[in-house]
Amino acid sequence: MCDKLEHTPGCGGLDRRNFLRVSASAAAIGLTGGFVASPAYADALTKAQRDKMTPDQIIAAMKKGNERFRKGVRKDRNYLNEQKASASGQYPAAVLLSCIDSRAPAEVIMDLGIGDIFNTRLAGNIDNSDILGSMEFACQLAGAKVVLVMGHTACGAIKGAIANAELGNLTGLLAKIKPAVAATEYKGERSATNYEFVDAVARKNVEMTLASIRKNSPVLAALESKGTIKIGGAMYNLKTGGVEFFS
């Protein structure tokens, strides 16, 4: 079993069940592996493990996971075990709002497993009442401690909003991004072909979505004011594979 443990010194026959028993006093849960400092073939995140973690520790675990992803040393997971372990209950540590872009799957780029996060995906990672309701469920009822809005570079939805693209229902979606286009301070060429401007708008769009969440969800705003949850933003760089976290 020792050869299956990841970042767990002196395993000495420590199996999964015993590890979870003795890890009750481990302050570094989630900081050495994914969300669980456990064997490479760990099961899904448990309520006890999630509840021991602070919002800052959860974000730190996401950062560690992204570092592993960028280095090409992602955790060796058994997704079948995670699926079976989470079938009777789920205890995600965070809820993410990210873009539908196929190149930016949150669980992959932050090396997370089944049951680790709720993930809402929508072109341009904008919020609406349904998404806010989902976030309220995730945090108030299910116990998630982090709300993270993640945009990404070279975002097609951002480019479409800048270029005033029109197509069926997409027209209305892009209209919700246009306030971020207008609010972005930029002295260069303000076009969809200038990727520096596109990325600046994408970041502004994340910032404005965070403000919208705090304004339009008294439930989440109250949880944040009490320190129960942390609401933050992130930008994923398609070229480098890195995730930049910010408030």
Image: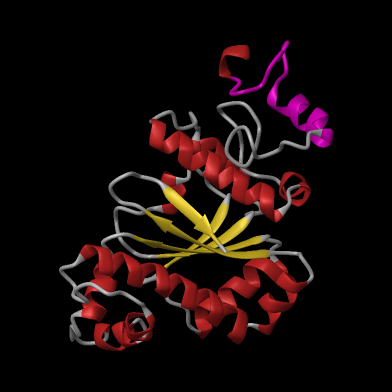
178 lies above or below 27? below
Residue at the outermost front position = 187
8 lies above or below 214? above
Image-based side of 100 in relation to 132, left or right: left
* Residue 123 in sight in this render: no
Residue interval drawn in magenta: 5-25
Residue 225 drawn at (x, y percent): 75, 73
Residue 242 drawn at (x, y percent): 40, 46
Q: Is residue 20 magenta?
A: yes
* Residue 208 in sight in this render: yes
Residue at point 37%, 65% (across, down): 99
- Quadrant for the N terminus, please: top right
Residue 215 drawn at (x, y percent): 60, 85
**Is 127 in front, or is 243?**
243
Image-based side of 18 in relation to 216, left or right: right
**Is 83 in front, or is 167?**
167
Residue at point 68%, 47% (across, down): 57
Residue at the outermost top position = 12
Q: How many marks?
A: 0
96 lies above or below 73? below
- Picture quarter containing residue 33? top right
